[in-house]
Amino acid sequence: MEILLVGTGQLAEAMIDRFHKNRDRVYLLTGRRECTPVRQRVFEQYDFAYDDDSVKDIFDSIKPDITIFTGAWDSQFDWEKARQESVRYTAGLINLLTVYSMRGKGRFVYLSSQEVFTGSFHQNVLESQDKEPKGFRSMAIAQGEDICANFRQNQGLEIDVLRLDHLYCVPKKGQPTPDPCCAMCLEALKSGKILASSRDVFSMLFVKDAAELACKAITAPKLEQSVYHISSMEEIDGLQLAKLIQETMSVEVVDESVGEYRRLILDGSAFSQEMGQKIFTHYPEGVKRVAQYMKRNRESFIQVEDAGGSRAARMLHGSRILFAALVPYMENIVCFIFFFLLNRLAAGGSFFRQVDLFLLYVLLFAVTMGQRQAVLSSFLASIGYFLLQSRGYSGFAVLMDYSTYVWMAQLFIVGMVVGYIKDQIFTLKEDSREKIAYLEGRLRDIEEINDSNVRMKENFETQLINQKDSLGKIYDITSTLEHQAPEEVLFTAVQVLSQLMDCGGAAIYTVANRSYARLFSSTSKEARSLGNSIEYIAITEMYDELKERRVFINKAMRENLPQMACAVYSEEGMELIFMLWGIPWQRMTMAEANRLAVVGQMVQTAVVRANQYLDALSNQRYVEGTRLLAGNAFFQLTRAFLKARDQGLTECTLLEVPVPGGDCAAAASALSGCVRQSDYMGSIQNGVLYVLLSNTSPENAEFVQERFRTTGYQSCVVTEVAQ
């Protein structure tokens, strides 16, 4: 295949090696205007900017089967100047896509990263998750994905996006990469210790594994999705990573596990199921390779003021820096010897008689090295002049000659003036660089503050204009519960709760006694993860808050607990427990807790009324001495359960039990010991008994059917009650 690889860096080089093994022909577009050394295993290299007009000629010449834009992992973008680079990044991508769309053939692959997401995610992030970029770099990467999506939808092109999760690699000398592993190794080299937090959770992917997996997707005949996550999905936190580095570098690890909890891991299960996935470099091996290389080449990564570690290491580093500082003076002395010998050889010639070689020597070092080197070179030139003049005269005569001192004064004046001008120009340039760096830092701070203000402004606009969070809107939604049939209120309430709290899942548990609560309705699989019945007092972290009538917030982000929960009370005590799942970390605040409390209070009246009505159905409207509900009451209750099941709000199974002789009351008495208190029995027609099993799937209903058979009754699963 003809493959056009756009971009440079460690990932690009790993992909070149991978394609070379497949005997594919790789063309490289570097994005640089100046000529660079040609990479090995590249068939042809083009040194043009991505937005250059020559890109069209390159496409016409190559006619690539696959075009790969390394995007987020392209090393030729200098993101220290993120504002300017984001413009260049977007312009280059649009030009590439425009030229690709004009040709209309082949596949275009855009490599993105986890940076398009911010915040904390309790579960691994799926491809369908909405992007939330922050900062110019992440916004440029996310905008690149949107541009690719627009070209794909509007022009029907084959454009795929691959998001790679936290790549790390062995850096080149003096070129540290921004990944967590390299950053910690660099910190260890500079300070001799690593500050790490266990509250920062992520997963990393070694660059060669990323190249292998990405190439597998790129060369696949057809992809089922347009966006894929490529991730090792091997969870690691900052403290664990620091300890792995400590094994190689022998530095101190300082645990700073305080502050905000942040978890960001891309879910690569879709990619793994479709194409298969095998990780060759796991954390112990990959981190060790990075740490060993940076430790071995520490001098290329640190400065003299950064040198960390032992006293011997600092002394060795200082001696090397001192030697490097003395090299210019040694060069000066070597050049003086050369000029001295040249002046001595040319002293008798008529051609060089009018040329002052010592003056040229002083000017050379004054212009290139500055005032200090000018003084040294003037001093050495004066010594050389004295030695040359002493050849024809006595040393005393040379010292008494006033022209000697005039010449020396001239030499020192010219050297010091030129050196001073050189130093001043250098100082002005350095001051300008520092001022620009300072202003750019201030600009980044202002941009971050502005981003925060914009988000707050948008939140307030949403509240004031759309009125989604206003008390009036909440009351308007919750008041609809008053008009629902009692059997349907609890099912509708969980939808209202999920809608008002804008969460990924909600569940309502009814309190059975002082220890246990039963799941009544839920909106997602995650919301049902605690099970159909829980011993809520055993969950002390949550129960301690609920019994004080406070809202529980899962600040520790424990996996087996909801993000937020609150309880609804009546005169008899706790009646219901509301649980919320899938709430981002940044929204788990006191404001959200107060909002949940308000919503809970507004839902409370209708929900408690409905719950009491259902209890009345099971305790009052039954045939005397049995648990058999009256026909109409059972029909209404069954209809509500089946409707909620179809909406995905609960699980239930309806069993039909033929009763020989038609005595349903006797059958209900015989079978009452085989069902739970939360199950219901009723008879709509003579000779047929129906059993409604709440929170029970058809598979689990088989256990109940087996109990019925041991009692002497056969049963089958039905979808509705026959009237």
Image (cartoon, rainbow, N blue to C red):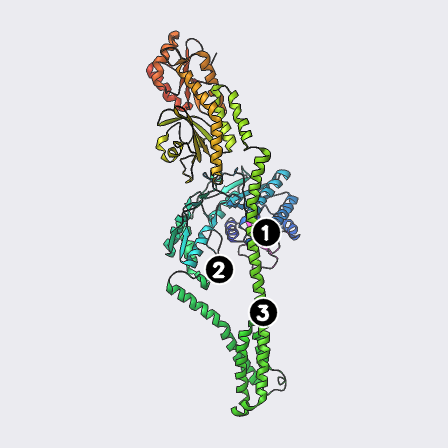
Q: Main secondary structure of the magenta part?
A: loop
Count neighbours of disc 1 (C-alpha within 10 A) and say few if under 14, some if 14 to 19, many if 20 or more. some
Residue 401 visible: yes
- The CA span between labels 3 and 1 is 31 Å
Q: Amino acid at mark 2?
A: Gly
Q: Amino acid at mark 1?
A: Arg
Q: Which residues are magenta?
A: 24-51
Q: Which residue is label 3 attached to?
A: 424
Image x and y of residue 278, in percent:
44, 43
Q: Residue at x 44, y 36 (%)?
A: 563
Asked if 130 appears above or below 332 in the picture, the reply is above
Q: Nearer the viewer, mark 2 or mark 1?
A: 1
Please tell me whether mark 3 sits on a helix, a strand or a loop. Answer: helix
Q: Amino acid at mark 3?
A: Gln
Q: Nearer the viewer, mark 3 or mark 1?
A: 3
Q: Nearer the viewer, mark 3 or mark 2?
A: 3
First-in-chain label (3 vs 2)? 2
Asked if the residue at tag 2 contacts the one at tag 3, i.e. Cβ–Cβ closer than 8 Å, the answer is: no
Asked if the residue at tag 1 contacts the one at tag 3, i.e. Cβ–Cβ closer than 8 Å, the answer is: no
Q: Nearer the viewer, residue 721 or 611?
A: 611
Image x and y of residue 243, in percent:
38, 51
Q: Which residue is label 2 attached to?
A: 174
Q: How many marks?
A: 3
Task: Confirm whether the magenta stretch covers residue 25.
Answer: yes
Task: Confirm whether the magenta stretch covers residue 302.
Answer: no
Q: Nearer the viewer, residue 225 or 257?
A: 257
- The CA span between labels 3 and 2 is 29 Å
Q: Which residue is label 1 attached to?
A: 83
Count neighbours of disc 2 (C-alpha within 10 A) and say few if under 14, some if 14 to 19, many if 20 or more. few
Residue 69 visible: no
Please tell me whether mark 2 sits on a helix, a strand or a loop. Answer: loop
Q: Residue at x 40, y 66 (%)?
A: 315
